[in-house]
Image: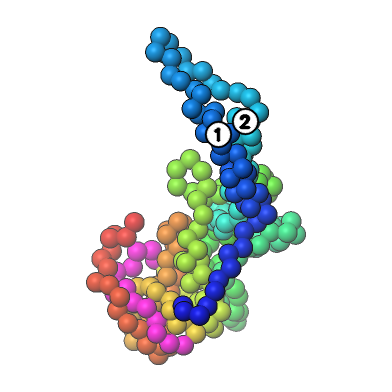
């Protein structure tokens, strides 16, 4: 905006990296220009020397910065061991998130309100994926969830919506994945800004939130909060 100024702050290592690129540009240019393709050989000569080693050091620095960045991941754990795993992670100094909901257990002579995991079998944890050995070796941890050959971070916006629902005080519960309905955004109240699929059952309006990575959903009671449609009606199985 006009009249405002912004200051971009970078880690000291990034500043050093930028300076290194600037000061060694001429060395790199000279090195690259001195390497000529050999028309009589199919073998490529790998250059060496102080200038090349300096470039390699810069590359290692950038990789180190990227690898030290932390993300939130979903840990698949053994059934009924979510709390135990979360406690162990906490004692090790990790940030964890275990969404719970209130459930009523009834017996013939009494009933009891308990808190159960919204996503049974999963605990969320923030860590550097290249340093995950202390986590995957914890008893009852099966694996770090991911698509393909390695772990995949949880979508930050989806996880934040779950946090918002947890803090709203609204009634919530697990829900079947890929619910059919209208995609909406909540406009008011403690859920304002949350996006999900609108459903109505037995006169109760709810919005279904989904964590795509683990293919699990939860439903939050709207309790009179206004919503606005933001897309056509979703059909069951249309999500992926």
Q: Which mark is residue 126?
A: none
Image: 90 above or below 160: above
Residue denoted by label 1: 28
Q: Position of residue 40 (x, y in %)?
A: 40, 9
Could you tell me if the residues under marks 2 and 1 are in contact, i.e. CB atoms within 8 Å?
yes
Nearer to us in this view, 162 or 72: 72
Query: Which residue is drawn at the image coordinates 56% and 39% (left, top)?
Result: 25
Segment tinted magenta in the rendering: 176-189
From this viewpoint, which residue is outermost toward the right?
91
From this viewpoint, which residue is outermost toward the bottom?
224
Give the structural element (helix, strand or loop) at label 2. helix
Query: Which residue is drawn at the image coordinates 45% and 63% (left, top)?
Result: 211
Residue denoted by label 2: 51
From this viewpoint, which residue is outermost toward the top?
40
Give the quarter of the figure containing the C terminus: bottom left
Q: Position of residue 49 (x, y in %)?
A: 63, 25
- Mark 2 and mark 1: span between their CA atoms? 7 Å
Nearer to us in this view, 34 or 173: 34
Q: Position of residue 51 (x, y in %)?
A: 62, 30
Q: Classify residue 182 by image quadrant.
A: bottom left
Q: Position of residue 134 (x, y in %)?
A: 69, 47
Tell me which colouring the rendered structure shows. rainbow
Report the label total: 2
Give the structural element (helix, strand or loop) at label 1. helix
Magenta region includes residue 45: no
Nearer to us in this view, 201 or 225: 225
Left or right of 87? Residue 99 is: left
Q: Earlier in the sequence, mark 2 or mark 1?
A: 1
Image: 49 above or below 185: above
């Amino acid at each position: 905006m006009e009249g405002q100024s912004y200051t971009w702050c970078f880690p000291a290592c990034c500043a050093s990296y930028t300076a290194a690129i600037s000061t060694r540009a001429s060395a790199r240019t000279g090195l690259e220009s001195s390497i000529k393709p050999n028309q009589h050989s199919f073998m490529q000569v790998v250059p060496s020397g102080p200038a090349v080693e300096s470039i390699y050091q810069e590359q290692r620095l950038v990789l180190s910065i990227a690898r030290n960045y932390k993300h939130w991941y979903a840990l698949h754990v053994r059934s009924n061991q979510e709390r135990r795993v979360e406690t162990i992670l906490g004692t090790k100094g990790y940030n964890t998130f275990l969404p719970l909901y209130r459930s009523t257990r009834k017996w013939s002579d009494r009933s009891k309100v308990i808190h159960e995991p919204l996503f049974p079998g999963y605990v969320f944890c923030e860590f550097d994926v290249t340093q995950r050995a202390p986590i995957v070796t914890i008893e009852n941890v099966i694996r770090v969830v991911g698509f393909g050959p390695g772990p995949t971070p949880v979508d930050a916006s989806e996880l934040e919506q779950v946090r918002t629902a947890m803090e709203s005080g609204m009634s919530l519960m697990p829900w079947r994945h890929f619910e059919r309905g209208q995609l909406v955004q909540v406009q008011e109240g403690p859920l304002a800004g949350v996006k999900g699929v609108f459903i109505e059952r037995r006169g109760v309006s709810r919005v279904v939130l989904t964590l795509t990575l683990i293919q699990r959903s939860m439903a939050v009671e709207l309790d009179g909060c206004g919503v606005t449609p933001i897309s056509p009606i979703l059909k069951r199985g249309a999500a992926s």
